[in-house]
Amino acid sequence: MIEEGAMPTRLALLAFAIVLSAAGPTLAESYPSRPITMIVPWPAGGPTDTIARIVSERMRLSLGQPIIIENIAGAGGTIGVARVARAAPDGYTLIIGDWNSHVLSGAAYTISYDLLTDFAPVGLLASNPQLLLTKKEIPAKDLKTLIAWLKTNENKVTVGTGGPGSASHVCGLYLQNAIGARFQFVPYRGGAPLMQDLMTGQIDLVCQQASNSLALVRAGQIKAHAVAAGARLAAAPHIPTVDEAGLPGLHVAVWSGLWLPAGASTDVVARLHAAVTDSLADPNVRDRLIDLGLEIATRERQTPEALREFHASEIKKWWPMVKAANIKID
């Protein structure tokens, strides 16, 4: 026998439970509800770090939460990438990777993760074409005369790189194979000492990202002979492309993108992707990136699906060259 007043009470509790169940998604914690960490697998002040800080600054407005930049450098970017591969796929840890960390490193280093399956792509950001640069003293007025000088001085030419398997190293290998000459490669621990030695004439030639060298070109401290791309840079329209200058097809660019750990929900990916597109559409962000010599990805190429396909195609294109050069770092 049900006591008087018990039935209404039970009905009220049942009704309250139903209301809570229906309101569950609304009452659940919304994403993001706290700061997000963006791992940069390179030292502070480098090209990828600069892009991260410009883009994340605007993403904060769309997400309503700050993005904290954490630089975890070392071993060709593999230390920072491994950290994200092991992170919880909750959307609070993401990585800005580039051609070095997410393509070349996989062919040159022994890694504990799969670059394609252990990460969820968020979006492609920008591309940073390499410039073919020399010290001022090189007696070449354009790319054709530079190639002639390189061939004449074969085996004596010194080419600075960011280390074995780096973008500058692969670009140098690509160049020597294209012209049929051989260089002496000089490895450096970072872009700053490399560019310092180019300015002071300690090395002859460098393939370097536009964002890391345009200021020195503009100041007349080094020479830029060509941009390794199919189109001239908006920030430096006076520099011809390799196609125009006599070495067609030598296209080398350090592109950057954003990834989450694999397993991140589609809602989280979509939320971050929307913040990326907002950032890259912002006039101030665009002006700052373009002034650095960067080519911003078109809206169609910013999608997670487009980044996934492009990433896979880049691995297929570049790994054979790195492996054929026997570049292997354990």
Image (cartoon, grey):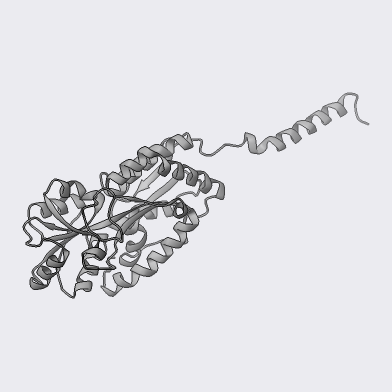
Q: Residue at x 38, y 39 (%)?
A: 283
195 and 283: which one is in front? 283
x, y percentage for residue 290? Answer: 31, 46
- In the depicted structure, whether residue 174 falls above or below residue 202: below
In this orientation, does residue 164 appear? no
x, y percentage for residue 17? Answer: 75, 34
264 and 246: which one is in front? 246
Instruction: Answer with the quarter of the image where residue 288 lies.
Output: top left
Q: Residue at x 48, y 49 (%)?
A: 88
Q: Residue furthest right?
A: 1
x, y percentage for residue 230? Answer: 31, 61
Instruction: Answer with the quarter of the image where residue 171 lies.
Output: bottom left
x, y percentage for residue 249? Answer: 29, 68
Q: Residue furthest top?
A: 5
Q: Residue at x 32, y 62 (%)?
A: 105
261 and 303: which one is in front? 303
Is residue 278 found left or right of 134 in the rendered image? right
Is residue 318 found left or right of 85 in the rendered image? left
Q: Quadrant of the N terminus?
A: top right
